Amino acid sequence: MSFFDRLLGREKRSTIKSNDPYLAEWFGLRSGIGGYTDPARASGIAVAHACIAIVSQNLAAMPLNLYRRTQDGGRERAVEHPLHSVLHDMSNTALTAFEARESLIASLMVTGNAFGILDRNQRGQVVGLTPIDPCTVAVEKLQSGRMRYRVSYPSGGTRYYLQEEVLHLRYRLGRDGIMGLSPIQIARETFNLALTQQDTACDQASKSFKPEGALVFPNTIGTEQRQSVLDKLESKVNSDLSTRGILVLDGGTDWKSFSFSSKDAEFLESRKLTNLDICRIWGVPPTVAGITDNATYSNSDQESRALVVRCLAPMARRVEQAMNATLLTDTARKTLFIEHDLAGLLRGDMKARYDAYSVGRNGGWLSVNEIRTLENMPQIEDGNEFLSPLNMTELGDRDADDAGGNNDI
């Protein structure tokens, strides 16, 4: 404030701008076109809830295994490691692995961040994982470059955790290099439009879709007569009775509507387009989210595979790398790694699978037991043998056979 402003008593307020959604929620900012979007309301939109449920439930249902690298370059499940049980069976004494992973991924898709408190044994191995509300976590970057997490509990207590004690999943890294960006806040205009359309539909439904308009009289009427007409019209149109009766307008009275119908305003088509935009935000195919306007048997099958390749696979890799960096120590990562098993979602129908197995078996690079393992069937005796096609051999052997034949001649 300048000297003349202070002398004249004029007050000048400064505006503080922040893109923190929790700060906006704290000060009670309401959602609107171009403004802050309430994640709870936005995630409650039907198509948004469907997208969040599809991604979180499908990834939580997929096996998340702890593997050990073998000497021959293969892998085997490290079922004896305590972390395998945390990822596969029970994350802690109160949550199953499915529930914990579903909660983390849903939080990641809504707020852009997901946090889980780690419980380690005396050997430093993770034996428990507990998801927490992102609203209760504050992240601080120390001078050493490491992260420190401050968690505020509902009871009023506060506790600090080191980087090794918290699993932090981020949707997209923000410019601060610490927190992830919420997809709802990134595309807030789309979600605000969807919420506005939803509120408009609810407002029309609450009024039983009654039109708004004006009664036009050919001649001037008095104030008392005008009020009498409005009262009679109000009692007829806005009556709570299921049978409202018949309204008679005489004396040349005409009705002029002020409102557009949903068809004239293309309201329904606009809502469909908004639903498609929400599916695009998370990369979920429309048919998978239940939008079947242009669905056929062919494109529904292709979009189911596109869900895995374009949506679930990147999200799975994001979770895997964060877990490998946090749940495993530097020494453990040399022999152990965490990975989703998405093969089941990418498999085709039975005929297509069996044709592929036939190619691998006859080509000599799949054994019977490997095929049975892919089909979740027990192995059999002598099932590890590989076939050798008669019309195929290595190039060196072929040259040797040709040379031997020429010498004989």
Image (cartoon, helix red, strand yellow):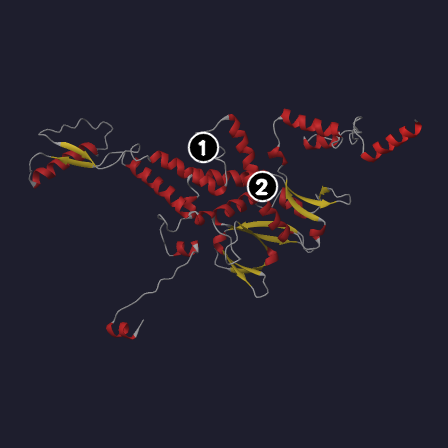
| Residue at the image position 70 percent from the left and 28 percent from the top | 359
Q: Position of residue 135 (x, y in %)?
A: 47, 53
**Frontmost residue, 303 versus 398:** 398
Q: Position of residue 96 (x, y in %)?
A: 58, 42
Q: Which residue is mark 2?
A: 313
In the image, farthest residue toward the top: 351
Q: Which residue is mark 1?
A: 291
Which element is circle 2 on? helix
**Frontmost residue, 90 versus 214:** 214
Q: Is residue 85 above or below residue 137?
A: above
Q: CA distance from mark 1 to mark 2?
A: 22 Å
Query: Which quadrant of the figure has residue 71?
Result: top right
Q: Quadrant of the N terminus?
A: bottom left
Q: Amino acid at mark 1?
A: Ile
Q: Position of residue 24 (x, y in %)?
A: 40, 55
Q: Is residue 50 visible?
A: yes
**Frontmost residue, 235 versus 19:** 19
| Residue at the image position 90 percent from the left and 29 percent from the top | 406
Which element is circle 1 on? loop
Left or right of 375: which side holds 304?
left
